[in-house]
Image (cartoon, grey):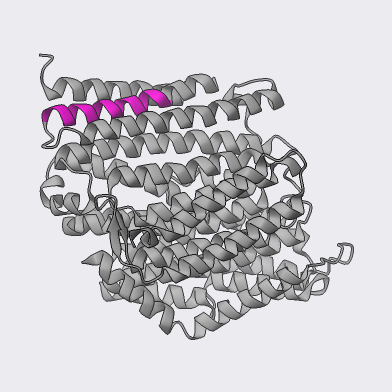
Amino acid sequence: MKVLLFGPELYFLGMALVLFILSLRRQVNIRIDHQVALGFAAGGVVVASACLFQQGELFFAAYRVDLFSQIFKVALALGLFLVLMISHNLAHIDDRYHAEFYLFLTTCTLGLMMLVSAVELLTIYVSLELSSYSLYILVPLRRGDDMDIEAGVKYLFIGAVSSCFMLFGLSYIFGATHSTYVNEVMAKMPELVQSPIGIMGLLLTLAGFFFKLSVFPFHFWAPDVYQGAANQVTTFIATVSKAAAVAVLLRLVALGEVYGFGFTQALWILSIVSMTLGNLVAIVQKDFKRMLAYSSIAHAGYVLMGILTLSEAGYTAAIYYAVAYLIMNFTCFMVISEVANDGRNLQIVELAGLYHRNPLLGLALMLGLFALAGVPPSIGFTGKLLVFTSAMKEGYFWLVLVGAVNGTISLYYYLKVVYAAYFLEGKELPAVHIGLSTRALSYALILIIIGFGVFPDRVVELARVAVKGVLL
Amino acid sequence: MINNIETYLYIAVFLFAIGLYGVLARRSLIAVLISVELMLNAAMINFMAFNRFLAPHPAVGQICALFIMAVAAAEAAIGLSIIVAIYRKMKTINVEHATELRG
């Protein structure tokens, strides 16, 4: 029954085929398109959850199915479902392209799912490109001004160049180790890092992934793409693809473990600069999406902090933080796409008076932002707590200190948004009406943000078991 | 002279450098796309050279090269379609005109 191991991927491949057929129809019916996509995505969550405890290897051991990969697959399927939930109103995308929009979201999710299971360099590369290429198409799909197409061009070419760097690095790793399997490369790591060619290869490869994670110094594409892409696409990039990037980084950094000091020191610097730069630049932003883009750079720094400890606790914290970030960031983006229901870019001042224009969305926004800032008792706080304590245990005092200071700085601009929503009157702005599904979604997100913040044990325990398989 | 690995590695680095220079210096999007292809080819030469001279298994590098070719073709298709779209909107494919997003 090896087919079952590949279950979630096969399911999403089938879903992509159905959506492809839908996109070929001459008469467009956007309601049906959305319902089909949403129904399939809900099924995808079920399939991915059913395959949670699968174990095994596929395709000449190029593809490993374990708890670690399956947890991330559930998270990815859930992320796709959530993004489709808020896609009921795609005002800024031509009706004709709705089915294609869902199609490319699905292929992107498929690519990311393959990415989290891939343990062979060529497989990693191909699945990474499958997901990136889908995003390259999704970003310029927005209609209207020229902003989208400019964002699309920037994203495409920066992405293409960074994947060239990665590929060049991979070729050196292949040359130095004569293998493309991650575990065989890992075994030869000590001699690899002694040779200049091995170090070059490793650094170039990691550069490609840092681009995906938008860690400094590969962050500059993020704000432009966030601002230029349609709100739902931005949501997807900011949540789902981030979670997958963390997963791959965890697997790959486990590679550098034997190298020790110099390697972690490089990550140490990246983490600090990424946090500080992201937070400081976010302060001056007026566009809400752009602000979240810079804050995502900062959050990449926090996740790196967990990863660079190279310990079980640190990895567990990083997984928890990645999933928590997916949820809390999604909450903010849900509010954006509901308030900006004509698909425009939302300025922070436009959130004025959200507490009376729509109390539920106001509450969700506040909790989402509090979670991002790390205010207890939200999941964001628990995530930061886990990351900081794991770094502290390994003796990274200064790193934790910088992280804590950064947390305080970030509080300032998150609270600025909360201030706009709760203390500005905004009498002239219209009330925001939301449908039943969005209302249910808001309640669910609020419950998750508080619930898993107060009782994180089960998720943490699951993450810990998953990490054991990766660290070996 | 020709039949050793260093020659091929130098050629690859050289190609990669040309490609990178092209990406940074050229203003036309088509030229940038071509430069990106050069960089991909540099990686491909590396794979083939390592495969020819060092690898115990003779097929792996070739398979990598084949995959890169296919992926590069897909990339070119997407790149060109976006370039066509940008030309329809802006009537130019010069990157200097794409400067609306700032901050």
> The C terminus of chain A lies in which quarter of the figure?
bottom left
Helix, strand or loop for the magenta stretch, by majority = helix
- The part of the image, by quadrant, that contains residue B49 is top left
Q: Nearer the viewer, residue B56 or A13?
A: A13
Q: Is residue A401 visible?
A: no
Query: How far from the left and from the top, in percent, is residue A88?
Result: 72, 58
Q: Is residue A161 shown above or below A179?
A: above
Region in magenta: B36-53
Residue A338: image x %, image y %?
74, 61
**Residue A337 visible to an observer of this rendering:** yes
Residue at image x 49%, y 19%? B31
Q: Is residue A360 magenta?
A: no
Residue at point 48%, 23% (across, down): B32
Can you say which quadrant of the picture contains the N terminus of chain A?
bottom left
The answer to which image quadrant residue A432 occupies is: bottom right
Q: Position of residue A145 (x, y in %)?
A: 73, 37
How many numbered discs, if any?
0
B95 horizontally vs A311: left or right: right
Relative to A122, A423 lies left or right: right
Please tell me whether residue A370 is drawn above or below residue B41 in the rendered image: below
Q: Residue at x 35, y 32 (%)?
A: B68
What residue lies at 10% left-to-right and 47% top-to-bottom? A191
Vertical placement of residue A166 versus A417, above or below: above
List x then y, in percent, for residue A330.
59, 64
Query: Farthest residue toward the top?
Result: B1
The one nearer the camera, A290 or A131, is A131
Direction front: furthest residue: A1
Relative height, residue A447 to residue B61 (above, below): below
The one of A49 and B23 positioned closer to us in this rendering = A49
Q: Nearer the viewer, residue B99 or B88?
A: B88
Question: Magenta span has B37?
Answer: yes
* Residue reaching furthest to the right: A428
